[in-house]
Image (spheres, grey):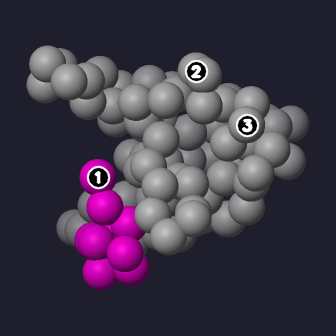
Amino acid sequence: MTTKRYSVVLTELGVAELTPIIRTALRKKNGVAYLLCTQVNPAGPYFSMRVEDKFDDATTIELEFQVQHAYIRGVFAAADLKLLGFTA
């Protein structure tokens, strides 16, 4: 079974509001800000996601948090997000 990975693309408002909190997990490429997620759930009043974050000292943690739907521009899912241009 192939494991899906998700790239959650943020709106400008989402980037402005969330950057202070998730600075190390936030990725940017070609003017697009996104988070690489292992799990997402758009159901309910908030968009829930699980993000794997790596710090400078190579420590890895998994964060789960919920944000307003207004912060999300779109979600891409694939077994290999690198093929779509989303890299860690």
Q: Residue at x 38, y 79 (%)?
A: 84
Q: Nearer the viewer, residue 46 or 12?
A: 12
Q: Nearer the viewer, residue 1 or 46?
A: 46
Badge 2: residue crowd in 10 Å (few <14, some 14–19, many ≥20): few
Q: Residue flagged by tag 3: what amino acid is it?
A: Ala
- In percent of width and height, residue 43 lies at 75, 47
Q: Residue flagged by tag 1: what amino acid is it?
A: Ala
Residue pointed to by mark 1: 88
Which element carries disc 2, helix, strand or loop?
A: helix
Q: Residue furthest toward the left?
A: 58
Give the magenta-colored segment's residue range: 79-88
Tell which circle, 2 or 3, labels the residue nearer the N-terminal end.
Answer: 3
Position of the N terminus by quadrant = bottom left
Q: Residue at x 37, y 59 (%)?
A: 5
Q: Is residue 66 shown in magenta?
A: no
| Residue 12 visible in the displayed image | yes
Q: Nearer the viewer, residue 7 or 3?
A: 7
Q: Is residue 83 above or below residue 58?
A: below
Q: Residue at x 68, y 42 (%)?
A: 15
- In percent of width and height, residue 85 lies at 37, 75
Which element carries disc 3, helix, strand or loop?
A: helix
Which element carries disc 1, helix, strand or loop?
A: loop
- In percent of width and height, residue 48 lies at 64, 37
Please tell me the numbered disc located at residue 50: none
Q: Residue flagged by tag 2: what amino acid is it?
A: Ile
Q: Is residue 80 shown in magenta?
A: yes
